[in-house]
Image (spheres, coloured by chain):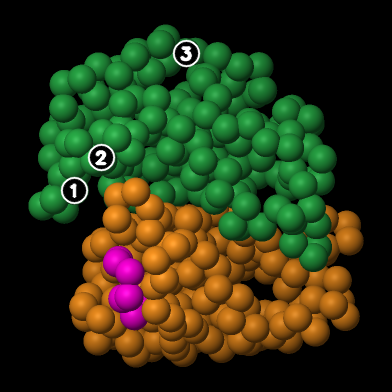
Chain colours: A orange, B green
Amino acid sequence: MPTIEEVQQLTRYWQQTIPSDYLDRMGHVNIQYYFRLYDTAATHLFDAFGMTETYVDEHQNGAFALEQHIRYLAEIHEGDRVSIYMRVIAQSPKRVHFAGFIVNDTHQRLASMFESLGTHADLVARRTTPFPPALAENIRSMLAADSQLAWDVPLSGSIHA
Amino acid sequence: MSRKTIPTAAQLQTLPIFQRDTITEDQLDALGHLTFGAYQALFGVAWWAFNDAVGLGEAYAQAHHGGIFALESHMTFLAEVNLGETVSIRLRVLGIGRKKLHHIFFMLNETTGRVASLSEGLGAFANLQTRRLAPWPDDITANLNALYLPTTTLDWEAPVCGLFAA
């Protein structure tokens, strides 16, 4: 796994403090809130791709999730401050593969790693479609920037764009 | 995705159901999609029902300070689910180790007969006081085996991500 200093070289797409209603009977953040944290950060990542609410409304295009993988590395508790960082891994005409990291700022450790495969989709036809050129170019430039980093993402190997 | 063979509705019939729900407006986003939160809530209800069924209910956690920690999850979204459709969440236990458990939940759309999504997981028994992984207690192992053993004769392979081993 990368160090938190390495993860902090990425763009932070979300930060929040953990409320008590995220906890389950094991006394730690329940897995459904990991998905929620990553989903919230991914919404901002897709905004950065150009897939904003305005884009979705005007073009009736959006994103569908196809596959997601989460590794739970350390427990997260009530009151902990967490930051979510994202990195583009790969793209294809219709798909984008990206990774996410939850850093527990309170305890200064990596709490979780995430991988997701999303596809561009026509929301009227309910079918996957290629990213339009402007969005594909945005993703390409973000991928190029992330590729300059000196560390590799420890991918699961089970997700491919 | 396409490299996995998804079981049919008929093949899933023998698996135990831990949640069944009919989709209402409040589970959908503005585009008519089941939200991520709704998927996770459905699998979450199934997860706790499964915990209760194997003897790891809240009373057990209180009395014995033990429960299951998730180590890794793999979600696959296969088909959309629409308003008014009924889904069931069915469990197949894939392996039981000394401390670990490998399982997969299938979300079957009972209305359309299609598998809507998969939630595969690797978990482990944990001591809730030390917060460390621990071997399964014998009675819990027996309960897990009661779910696992009937599935070992199934004639279909589960569509796993290939990374988890109990």
Three-letter amino acid code at disc 3? Leu
Foreground residue, B129 or B140?
B129
- Across and down, in percent, residue B154 comes to 47, 13
Reply above or below: B71 against B8.
below
N-terminal-most mark, 3 or 2 = 2
Q: Is the same chain shared between marks 1 and 2?
A: yes
Three-letter amino acid code at disc 1? Leu
Reply above or below: B157 against A101.
above
How packed mark 1 is, by other alpha carbons closer than 10 Å (few <14, some 14-19, many 20 or more), is: some
For this orientation, the residue located farthest to the left is B130
Q: Which residue is mark 2?
A: B61
Q: Are marks 1 and 2 in contact (CB under 8 Å)?
A: yes
Mark number, residue B128: 1
Mark number, residue A41: none
Nearer mark to the viewer, of 3 and 1: 1
**Quadrant where the image shows the C terminus of chain B:** top left
Left or right side of B68 for A62: right
Image point (30%, 19%), residue name: B143
- Across and down, in percent, residue A74 comes to 24, 63
